[in-house]
Image (tube, grey):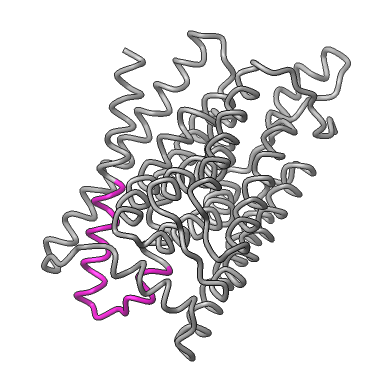
Amino acid sequence: MMYLLVLGGLILLLVGGEALVRGAVSVARKLNISELVIGLTLVGFGTSVPELVTSLQAIEKGAVGIAIGNVVGSNIANIFLVLAIAAIISPVFVHPQALARDGTFMLAVTGVLCALLWFDQFNRLSGFLLLALLTAYLVLSLVADQRRQSAAAELHQAEGESVEAHYGLGVGLLIALAGLAGVVIGANLLVNGATSLALSFGISETVIGLTIVAIGTSLPELATSIVAAYRKRGDVALGNIIGSNIFNILGILGITSLVSPFTVRGDITAGALAGAQPVSIISSVDVGAVVLSAGLLMLFAMTGRKIARWEGAVLLLGYILYMGLTFDLIPTVNLIPNV
């Protein structure tokens, strides 16, 4: 039964996420919203809606490991898995000017994520500040892009144009609502199935969140990136991944922390009773993978102005190694502070 819940949840997340983006983009076009705005907001962040709903559902059910693991694991999978596959299919050419702004900002917010994990500050104040930072980034990016037709503006416009959705206003709205309903139901099934799976196999909810749930909620990015790669528009895939990683940290963790503050220190009560300090449920390996993936993306993208096939293979190898470390096939040491 739990396998059916997980499988059904993944399918609904993929189909629902795709329908939500297409419906929302179609409605935006009928309202004469520019492709630039559509690309930067609806497309860039719309594919992260499955992660958002899943994390909110997980927090509501008390499954903190799945909620935080979903965000951390999705950012890792977006680069080490999704971008890797896109680059292997077709080399991903890079716009240096677009990368300089959006890529640098992604690195900065990755640092913010590491700080939040280190100090365990997932409270309402942090949530508000994360959302404020996301809003500022969107507003400043839109203002800058609309003032001058820069490489970043062209990339975001191409992201919007990549979505083939030209329905009527009413039909587009119905598709978007149906997609949202599918995402909500799918997230609920996935969280329930993933929790049962963790209990059944004696695996922590965090590991399930970092792997099965994270890969599942990254399926919309994977589908978008594969299509873009086949169309020789790897730059669109790269832009979508960068935008998704930014929203995962600022949007998902911001909203989740604001709605229901949480801690990543594990079972504090049990730790206190045992006379030991509670340990973070996110290990140093997870943090290292997030930082390394973002760093390699920037390094590969800045050298040769493209991510070549062999570089995509290196990224994919990184994900294979990370999976081995996550499932304890290779011994690790947790360096995250206990207090």
Using residue 321 as the reference point, say whether residue 176 is left or right of it: left
- Classify 313 as above or below 164: above
Q: Quadrant of residue 88?
A: top left
Write the residue at 51% across / 12% down: 199
Question: Where 305 sits versus 261, above or below?
Answer: below
Residue 34, magenta (yes or no): yes
220 left or right, relative to 267? left
Q: Which residues are magenta?
A: 17-40
Q: Main secondary structure of the magenta part?
A: helix
Does the segment drawn in magenta span residue 244? no
Who's the residue at 78% across and 26% down the image? Answer: 279
- 85 lies left or right of 170: right
Q: Quadrant of residue 136?
A: bottom right
Q: Residue at x 31, y 47 (%)?
A: 17
Q: Quadrant of the N terminus?
A: top left
> In this rendering, is residue 75 above or below 163?
above
Residue in the foreground of this view, choosing between 171 and 219:
219
Q: How many marks?
A: 0
* Residue nearer the viewer, 286 or 190: 286
* Above-or-below relation of 120 to 135: above
Residue 51 locus on image (x, y percent): 45, 44
**Residue 158 image-quadrant placement:** bottom left
Q: Measured from the top left, where is residue 242 in percent x and y?
A: 52, 58
Quarter of the C terminus within the rendering: top right
